Image (cartoon, grey):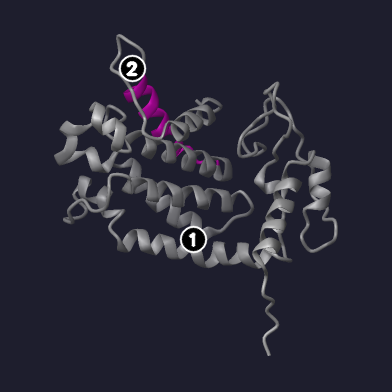
Amino acid sequence: MSNKRNISRRQFVTGAISVAAASSLPVHSALAKVGVTGKPEQQSPVALTDSPGWKDQGIENLAKSPHAKLRDIPIRAVTITGGFWGPRREINVTRSIPSMHDLLEANGRMNNYLRLVGKSTAAQSGPVYSDSDVYKWTEAVGFVLQSGDRPELRASAEKFIDEVVAVQEPSGYLNTYYQDDRKTLRMLPQTQTTGHELYNIGHMLQGAIAYYRATGDRKLLDAGVRFVDDFLIPSYGPAPKKPIVSGHSFLFSTSKKFLCGFA
């Protein structure tokens, strides 16, 4: 007979709220209360400072904000080993993320990069935001690796990152949809509005930062810095530069804010 319990939506949401609330507690309280096995877990505290090291930053560093009421903590400061969330996290790490890797390959997302360096004869496939799927997956891996090493996931991510940075142009530009045959459409006003160019670089930066915080590997992060510093900032912005419009401005501005801590 199965021991599984049906969990109502209310119970699920209540559990999520509890975890979110715990993550905003002061560090010494959070580390004592987040052990989901029901017993306090002993972990090394992570001090909140104005200039935390790259491994000690939360998802967003609010230490210098005069208006922030809560302070987040590094992902590695929280251990989930059982209870409601433990099995779900393990399924995400061992099944969902690896299967998404396989789907990215099967649906041609990496061929979009490989074709630009002569390693694939496949035509470009997928919508204008296809590159972002790769970066979202890399971000997920980065968050996982912040909680502990997963050699197979890290190897898969490093392979993807190598294939991504290989197609970056000397100018810093990197977007497989607008390289090669669509190059003339790049950064036109209409393309900026609906073409997801800045949306894609936003996800690239977020994925790069998550992976850097987990591993110290700057390869993807440096590619993002080059895109912003070498391609965007010199040519786009307030007059007399060319106008810049993002169809997903929140994502891009948030990513640039994160990037400032590393550039």
Q: Which residue lies under the disc numbered 2?
A: 234
Residue 227 in magenta stretch: yes
Determine which of the numbered discs, if any, sits on residue 97 in the image: 1
Percent of width and height locating residue 50: 70, 25
Evaluate whether residue 164 shows in this view: yes
Q: What stretch is highlighted in magenta?
A: 216-233
- Amino acid type indicated by mark 2: Pro
- Residue 101 percent coordinates (x, y): 41, 60
Q: Can residue 187 be seen in this view?
A: no
Earlier in the chain: of badge 2 and badge 1, it is 1
User: At x 69% / y 76%, what residue is drawn?
Assistant: 5
* CA distance separating discs 2 and 1: 37 Å
Query: Residue 198, how many percent across, how many down?
Result: 36, 33
* SS category of the residue bearing label 1: helix
**Which residue occupies the foreground of this view, 246 or 241?**
246
- Name the kind of residue labelled 1 in the image: Ile
- Residue 5, compared with residue 205, is above or below; it is below
